[in-house]
Image (cartoon, rainbow, N blue to C red):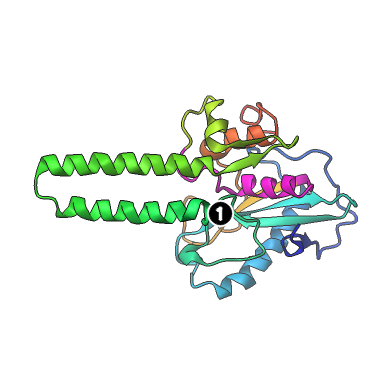
């Protein structure tokens, strides 16, 4: 385990109840220990974000989150991360990482995106409807193939160490095909790191950061995990098919 990803509590938590069971990611009830971790992580973001070339107070915000975990020696701390990527390709080495390694298969994603851009430019230059339709269909097929290849590289672990990729997870669910960016949300990334490094998940909290004028989400407010991308993944990882139904817990 990379120790810089494990945040030790600065707050005295000796009097705080440590839950025996992870709270429902889709529920509204958040354990006090997770709220404390989130508050500390927000202070970290406030300082760290000064290094990023992005103004979260006026531009589009992002979902962040924390997962309180326990080591084998019973030491309690927390992990933190962001949903998706930081804007402008900024990085933070203390965030739980994405499951996808961009260097996989000789940078297939980067090369594929370049090819899609070229195909898009060819469509713009085309002058006849038949040619435009043909190129548009070819680009759509290429895009779908690239997306499927990407999903195959997102491999998640569950509590017992069983591994499945996004395509396999959604195939056995009632949700259908995985939506774009499935696998890059906060909760799956945090749980993946915890399971991979034998850390016991204790409490989870996700919150919105940025754009104080946003009418849909409030800065620093807590929100449940998104259902359309995360439900099948989290049900697999936590081996619980009732997460969605029990979202009020």
Give residue 227's position: percent from left, percent from top: 55, 37
Determine crowd level at label 1: few under 14, some 14-19, many 20+ residues with C-alpha closer than 10 A. few
Name the residue carrying label 1.
Answer: 101
Q: Quadrant of the N terminus?
A: bottom right
Residue 28 magenta = no
Query: From the viewer's perspective, is residue 8 above or below residue 163?
Result: below
Q: Is residue 151 left or right of residue 98?
A: left
Measuring 58% from the left and 70% from the top, which residue is drawn there?
49
Measuring 48% from the left and 55% from the top, which residue is drawn there?
106
Q: Is residue 184 left or right of residue 131?
A: right
Which element type, helix, strand or loop, lies under badge 1? Answer: loop
Which corner quadrant of the image does residue 143 belong to?
top left
Residue 201 magenta = yes
Query: 8 or 223, which lies in front?
Result: 8
Which residue is most to the bottom?
Answer: 51
Query: From the viewer's perspective, is residue 148 above or below residue 89?
Result: above
Query: 170 or 26, which lies in front?
Result: 170
Q: Is residue 170 left or right of residue 11?
A: left
Give residue 101's position: percent from left, percent from top: 56, 54
Measuring 57% from the left and 47% from the top, which residue is drawn there?
185
Which residue is most to the front?
Answer: 106
The stretch in magenta equals 179-202
Q: Quadrant of the C terminus?
A: top right
Measuring 79% from the left and 47% from the top, which residue is drawn there?
198
Which corner quadrant of the image does residue 40 belong to?
bottom right
Give residue 173's position: percent from left, percent from top: 55, 26
Can residue 247 be spotted in the picture? no
Can residue 9 be spotted in the picture? yes
Give residue 66's position: percent from left, percent from top: 69, 53
């Amino acid at each position: 385990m990379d120790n810089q990803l494990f945040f030790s509590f600065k707050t005295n938590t000796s009097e705080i109840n440590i839950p025996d069971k992870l709270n429902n990611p889709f529920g509204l009830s958040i354990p006090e220990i997770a709220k404390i971790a989130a508050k500390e992580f927000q202070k970290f973001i406030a300082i760290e974000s000064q290094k990023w070339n992005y103004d979260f107070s006026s531009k589009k915000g992002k979902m962040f989150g924390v997962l309180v975990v326990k080591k084998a020696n019973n030491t309690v701390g927390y992990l933190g991360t962001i949903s998706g990527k930081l804007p402008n390709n900024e990085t933070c080495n203390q965030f739980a990482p994405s499951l996808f390694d961009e260097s996989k298969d000789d940078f297939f994603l980067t090369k594929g995106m370049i090819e899609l851009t070229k195909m898009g430019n060819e469509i713009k230059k085309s002058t006849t409807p038949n040619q435009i339709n043909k190129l548009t269909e070819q680009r759509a097929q290429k895009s779908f193939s690239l997306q499927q290849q990407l999903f195959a590289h997102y491999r998640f672990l569950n509590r017992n160490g069983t591994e499945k990729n996004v395509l396999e997870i959604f195939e056995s669910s009632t949700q259908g095909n995985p939506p774009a960016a499935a696998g890059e949300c906060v909760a799956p990334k945090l749980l993946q790191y915890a399971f991979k490094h034998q850390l016991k998940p204790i409490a989870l909290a996700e919150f919105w950061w940025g754009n104080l004028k946003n009418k849909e989400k409030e800065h620093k407010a807590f929100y449940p995990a998104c259902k359309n991308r995360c439900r099948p993944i989290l049900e697999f990882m936590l081996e619980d098919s009732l997460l969605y139904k029990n979202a009020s817990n």
